[in-house]
Image (tube, rainbow, N blue to C red):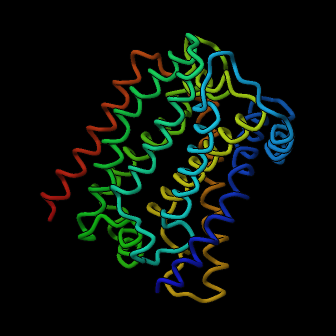
Amino acid sequence: MTGQAVVIAVVQLALLIFVAPLLIGVIRQVRARLEGRVGPGVWQPWRDLRKLLGKNPVHAEGSSWILTVGPLALVLSSLLLCVLLPLVGALNAPMIPSDLFVIVSVMLLGVVALALVGLDAGTAFGGMGSSRHMTVAALVEPTVLLAIYALSIPAGTSTLSVIVGARLRDPAIIISPVSVLAMVALAIAIMAETGRLPVDNPSTHLELTMMHEAMVLEASGRDLAWLEVGSWLKLAALLGLLGNLVAPWGIVTDMTLWSVLLGIVAVTAKILLLGVMLSVGEVFLAKVRLFRVPELLAGSFTLALLAVTASYLVA
């Protein structure tokens, strides 16, 4: 089982490295079409990465080694998420822990690394973006914990691979009120964690509203490429997790060549489909005002808390 889990982890890592830029290209292209524009094409993120990786970064005077190490730490945390989450397969192994608390801890590493990058140069915009970023993170992480904890109660464990396997064996759990409440809360938390509308607008640099873009203003060249890749990988991995929790069909439980191929196709389709739904929703959504963001995230936390409470009442 351990060897099979390692193979699945390597497959997931290779797949997400390819799918993440494609996902961003699809999101941008769908938004462009819905807004009446031609769009740059779904492969434009790959071309952007190739251009950025070929340029040396320029650091502001007074910046430290954090501006170099921070982007790499974000990429490494995102790659760890791609390995640990049950995306292509739900095979459990001790050396690849997919426990809920391990996953949230890995996510926090990337959150802190990105905030430090924004603070390092000492600019007003970077500090503002990092402050907002950590405020959102303080509200999002408890929601993620509670939402998945509500799903873990029927499975009797906080290991995500076991939770997905339990939902695959008993599809009635998926349409239960507990599951619906937890999925809505988790979807809102994922949009906030990855800086998407209505919490943040990734396509603007307006200083009054931006969070993610404010933290990466001082990054350039390869540093900016790593920051972009880390953010894209996190978005793709979390959308894949959400897709497998909502529709676990196609995930690998028995290690055969055809099941692995089916798992690759299934998780890719789920990620891209959720990306299309996300881009369509962003066209019709306005960004929430900053002082309303805590209210939105508090609402998602309440839904997750209701899911946990209902799961015990139903049990």
Q: Position of residue 132 (x, y in %)?
A: 45, 22
Relative to 154, say whether 23 is above or below. above
Q: Residue at x 41, y 29 (%)?
A: 136
Q: Position of residue 295 (x, y in %)?
A: 34, 24
Q: Is residue 79 left or right of residue 228?
A: left
Within the image, what quadrant is residue 7 found in?
Answer: bottom right
Relative to 268, say whether 7 is above or below. below
Q: Residue at x 76, y 44 (%)?
A: 25
Relative to 302, say whether 285 is above or below. above
Q: Is residue 35 left or right of residue 142?
A: right
Q: Is residue 121 left or right of residue 182?
A: right
Q: Position of residue 18 (x, y in %)?
A: 73, 58
Q: Is residue 244 left or right of residue 311?
A: right
Q: Position of residue 23 (x, y in %)?
A: 69, 49
Pick whichever, 105 or 294, lies toward us: 105
Q: Residue at x 47, y 16 (%)?
A: 289
Within the image, what quadrant is residue 155 found in?
Answer: bottom left
Quarter of the image that includes the C terminus: bottom left
